Amino acid sequence: MQHLLIIRFSALGDVAMLVPVVSSLAKQYPDLHITVLSRGFARPLFESLAPHVGFMEADLKNDYRGVHGLNMLYRRLKAKQFTAVADMHGVLRSWYLRQRFRLDRYRVASIDKHRQGKRRLAAKSGKEMVQQPTSFQNYADVLAQLGYPVHLAFHSIFGAEGGDLRLLPPAVGSKEPGCQWVGIAPFAAHEGKILPVEKTEKVIARLTERHPDMRIFLFGGGQKEWEQLDRWCQRYPRCLNASAQAAGLLQELIIMSHLDVMVSMDSANMHFASLTGTPVVSVWGATHPFAGFLGWGQSEENVVQADLPCRPCSIYGNRPCYRGDFACMNSINPDDILYKVEKSLTQ
């Protein structure tokens, strides 16, 4: 049997974007055994995709640190007797593993991240606003190099009915007929990708005013973010801190699968919601969908962004704002978000 190793360690959103590709591959090659090597957080994303899709966890910061650690990891991987290796990460550590496999005459292919095109897209001067290949296509191209061309076809990691709400805490409850559920994930890893808190609160306030029976589920990670989510829950009784109630990523995904729409920044939560088949109104600041990171199956019509000549100034949102005012986020009108949410609810 052919046994394919797929390597993708981080970041959260990039690993999530691998799911539709692996799912499509598994469906179209039922005799191919597939193992995804990633960080432990990603296990719920892959372990139920198909019987012949496996998952291996590797903590490169602790268990497999440095060259010595990578050599230990390679020996562990080699014992699995893979027949091909797909490096979907394209960083120094995955390059090292890739070279070890290549020297031992394994079939190996690696991702083309189209760095030059992305560099021109985010350039301060001479900017070229050209849509770059999506991460989904980049991943599929690696598989094609290895002899596994794949047609990308994916809807949700759950069935048509969504995840099982009975697995969740009582505070989540069941979804009553006619009751609309909206998710809001207002945070991201970098300031240039986060809508100002007061603008997010305006969205929450107006949704609760206009839709008094609506339930709003808030998502975020980390103590500081939870504190903000809890403050909103105290002010708006129809809000629930979903991340605090959920016991891990799988339960958050179950909640997302029952949302009518999610509001998210350009963040991992946009991708997580996309994997459950939920439409996402995505808010973009320093980054831009042209970089190829729009969530799976999401419509550009649901993108909220400011038309500024400086955008995008960053592919990942990690550069400081050279204007100094984060106009990309501060100029966004909460009513534009509200309009797209309500439009999505009526479709």
Image (tube, grey):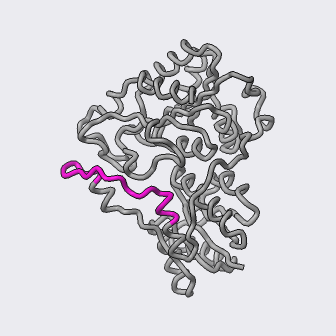
Quarter holding the N terminus is: bottom right
Q: Please state if 251 lies on the left or on the right of 345 as rendered.
A: right
Q: Residue at x 38, y 51 (%)?
A: 291
What secondary structure is the stretch in magenta mostly built from? loop
Q: Please state if 215 lies on the left or on the right of 205 as rendered.
A: right
Q: Residue at x 53, y 74 (%)?
A: 97
Q: Residue at x 64, y 59 (%)?
A: 23
Q: Image height check: is 260 above or below 272? A: above
Q: Please state if 132 lies on the left or on the right of 241 as rendered.
A: left
* Residue 73 point in image, percent of width and height: 61, 72
Q: Residue at x 61, y 47 (%)?
A: 275
**Magenta stretch: includes residue 130:** yes
Q: Is residue 19 visible?
A: no
* Residue 133 point in image, percent of width and height: 41, 58
The magenta-colored residue range is 121-140
Q: Please state if 255 lies on the left or on the right of 7 as rendered.
A: right
Q: Image height check: is 327 above or below 213? A: below
Q: Is residue 259 visible?
A: yes
Residue furthest to the left: 125
Front residue (pair 25, 266): 25
* Residue 339 point in image, percent of width and height: 46, 24
Front residue (pair 37, 111): 111
Quarter holding the C terminus is: top right
* Residue 176 point in image, percent of width and height: 74, 23
Residue furthest to the right: 166
Q: Image height check: is 109 above or below 124? A: below
Residue furthest to the front: 347
Q: Quadrant of residue 229?
A: top right
**Magenta stretch: includes residue 213:** no
